[in-house]
Each structure stands twice: as C-alpha cells, then as structure tokens.
Amino acid sequence: MKNLDSVLAAYLAGWAIFFVYYISVSQRMSALRDEVERLKTLLTKGK
Amino acid sequence: MELLSNTAVLLGKELRTEFRSRELLTTTVVFVLLIFMLFSITFHPTTSESQQFGPGLLWVAFLFAASLMLQPCFLREQTNDTLSALRLSVGDPFAIFFAKLTANTFFLLLMELLMLPFFAGFFNVHILSVLPQLFLVLFLGSLGIAIPGTAFSAISAQARMRELMLPLLLLPVLTPILIATTDVTAGLLGAEPSLNFAGLGIMIGFDVVFLTALWLFGEYLLEE
Amino acid sequence: MVKSIFKATILFVLIAVTAYLAFYYAPIEKSMGVIQKIFYLHIASAFSAFVAFGICFYANLRYVFTRRPKSDWLGVSAAEVGLAFISVVLITGPIWAHPVWGIYWTWDARLTLTFVLGLLYVSYLLLRSMIEEPDKRALLSALFGIFAFLDVPLVYFSIRWWRTQHPQPVILGGPGSGLEPRMRISYLLMWGALTGLLILLLNARYKLEALRASVEQLRREAEVR
C-alpha cells in the first residue's frame, strides 16, 4: 500500500477546499442578512 | 468602405498624436533596453544558451513593454473626455478599435525592430539571414498582442487600479501567443534555422479569433 | 432551511459512499498502484470546473445580449465555484504526479490549460472588484469573460505539439481504453457526487449574489434619504 498517505492527503485537501468554500459563502450570506436588517430599520426610521 | 475611410482618418489622428511627442516610443525603447541589459548581465549567456533562452527573454520583454505601451490607448481619450465625441463621429465603433489596434501594432513593431540589433548584440545571435521570416513573426506577434490589448485597454481604463489591471487581464490571455512566438523565434535563431509552421498557424488563428471577437463585441466595450 | 439541510445531507451521504467505493470497492490499478485512486477526485473535479466555466461563458454572453442582472449573478457565481473546483484539481494533480512522474509540475498541454484557466478567472473576479458601478461591472466583466473563454482552445493547441506527458483520457478515449467495471462504477458515482456538489455550491453562491444586489439597492435608497 505504497503512497496511501498521499491519496489520503489529496482527498482530505480536496474535501477541505469544498467545505471551506461552502462555509465562506454561508458566512458572507449571514453577514449580508444582518446588513439587510440594519438597512431596513434605517429606512423605516427615516420615514 | 465607410469603415475603412473612418479608420484611415482615426489612424491618422493616432499616429499624429504619438509622433508629435514620441512619448510612448521613447519610454518603451528605453524600458526594453533596460530589460535586455538586466537579463544579459545577470545570466551572462553563451551563444548556445542565448539560442535556447533568448527567444523567451525577447518576447517576455516585448510583452511587458506592450502592457505599458497599451496603457494610455483609451485612458488618453478618457482624461481628455473625447471618447463620446469619437463615438458620435463614426458610424461603426469598430473603426475606433481598428484604428487604435493598427496604430498599436505599428508602434509595437517599430519598437521591436529598433530593439532587434541590441538583442542580437547583447545575446550574440545571428538575425540577418532570417530577417524576413523574423519580421513575419514580429508582425503576427505584435498584432496578437495589440488586438486583445486594445480591447482590454478599453476595459481597464474604466476600472480602479487601472495601471495594474491591464497586465493582469492581458498577460494570461496572451499565453498562447507568447508560447507560439517564442517557439517560432527559437526555430529561426537556432543553429539550423527553420520556420515552425504549426506555431505560425497558432499565431494566425489567435489573431483571427480575437479580431472577430473584437469586431462582434467591440461596440459594447464603449458603452457609457 | 430544512430543504437545504436535506440536500446537503444527501450530498454528504453520496460523497461518503463514493469515497468508500473509491478506496475499498474499486481495485488497485496494476501499474500505478494505490496512488491511482486520486484520479476519481481529480478527474471529476476537473469535469465540474470545466462545466462551471462553461456556465460562466454562457452567462456572460447572455448578459451582453439581454442585460438581465440575473445572468451577471450566474456569471460571477459560476466563476467562483469553478475556481474552487480548479484549485482541487491543481492540488490533487501534483500529489499524484510526484510519486508517478517524479516531479510535481510540468508545462504540459493539459496542466498549462488548467493553470491558465484558473488565472483567467482570477483576473475576471479581480476586475469585478475594481469596478464600483453595477451595470458597468457586469458588462465589462462579461466581455472579459467572453474573451477569456475564447482563449481556452488556443492555450490548449499552442502547447499540444509539445511533448504531452499527461495520461490520455481513458473514459471516453479510443479503443482499448476500457475501464474495469468496478472502477467505472466508482468514477460514475464520484462524477455524480461532484456534479451535485457543483449544483449545491452554485445555488448557494447565486443566492448570495442576489442578496448582495438587493443590499446595494437598499444602500442607494438609504443614501438618497
């Protein structure tokens, strides 16, 4: 089973990239949701 | 026909603007000379090494010079606020691009021809026997740099950090033309000069593809 | 919310099953040994990346002709997701190449193509971040995207006549390129899993871009007051 550690490293790195990317999208999403809330309250107050 | 006459008028304008000051030509000539000198003194190549690495150095230097030279192409129109006047005065906006890219090709070619003797001298390669073939490569290569270069100069002129944006947009797109010109030039400068027709084919293909794309999409690049 | 968790769970199970198949069910390749198992992930990611960039090109063309912001959102989403997939390709590739070729990297046609493709779309995203006005950003980046995509075949053919080191495609290759059945099942499942992942990521990123557009809109309204 030569090189098995390389195979494991490749799979781990691959899944890690997908996972981190998905997390980053979710994080940006929740930051924007907060921003929407903030702007909406700002706009209703202005009226 | 109208396209050609419009282009001719605009081309005359581009050439006059540059020849009045000769700013672009002098700066890029000095710039390329500096790159040649730096490469030559840091690597200190023998003739056989130059035959191997020279073509790559030559085209990398030309590519960097071109990304500087293409910078003011649309920026100049923007700072002087002449672009909308230009667009109103010609029926087909492609004439603007056609004139600008012809002028850019011409100046690039002129700069390259001025620099060839320095290249031959610094790197000890013989160019006299293959001069006509070399001219063909220089022409197709300069055209290949100028077509996407003119298009992206119109894009980068409207962005922030435009001086950095143009090379970032241009250099990856120019990869095929860099590979092809380097290969063909290496064939010509080798111990037994030969013309690499596959490389010439790639260069012609590149020029045709991007000229067609510019013809089709150029008008959208100039929208306000 | 429940729906998205459900989708993510299905995908997770699919990926776990494929990983199991790739490691235990598929036989060990004769000449390369166990390292060949990287291919399942490598090839499927490459496929998804090319599909994503294809979608980006389609969205760019559509934006130029219809000017619908939705096409712009699709374009940026596809470019970003494509970059995620291509980074997996570019990381798993050298890990495979080092024990088999003895080197991490070479400028072979396919390797160059993948690398330049990644760079082109990095430039695309950078350009977007350098233009403030939404319509202008959408139009100019779409035009750059079109030019960039046209470059792809040229990059490939410009290196093609060089010595090509990359293994030839075995899945859709010519005669004699058949795959062992258990390997084929593993490939197909991995391909399905990563296509699912592509859709999931694309969908999430697209929603993000839509939300960003509405935030920009709200901000402008807030500034007017």
Image (tube, rainbow, N blue to C red):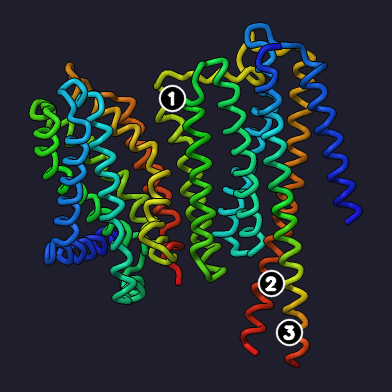
Disc 1 and disc 3: Cα gap in Å? 59 Å
Residue C72: give x, y in percent of width and height.
61, 59
Q: Which mark is residue C160?
A: 1
Assess disc 3: are there few (<14), some (14-19) or many (≥20) residues with their C-alpha within 10 Å of its C-alpha: some
- Which residue occupies 61% across, 54% down? C75
Q: Relative to B186, is C183 on the left or the right?
A: right
Q: Relative to C190, is B147 on the left or the right?
A: left
Assess disc 1: are there few (<14), some (14-19) or many (≥20) residues with their C-alpha within 10 Å of its C-alpha: few
Residue receiving disc 2? C215
Residue C178 visible to an observer of this rendering: no
State the SS at label 3. Answer: helix
Going by the numbered disc 1, the residue's amino acid type is Arg
**Between residues B203 and B57, which one lies in front from this camera angle?**
B57
Determine the chain carrying the residue at label 1.
C
Q: Which mark is residue B150?
A: none
State the SS at label 1. Answer: helix
- Which residue occupies 67% across, 12% down? A2
State the SS at label 2. Answer: helix
Q: Nearer the viewer, mark 1 or mark 3?
A: 3
Residue receiving disc 3? A42
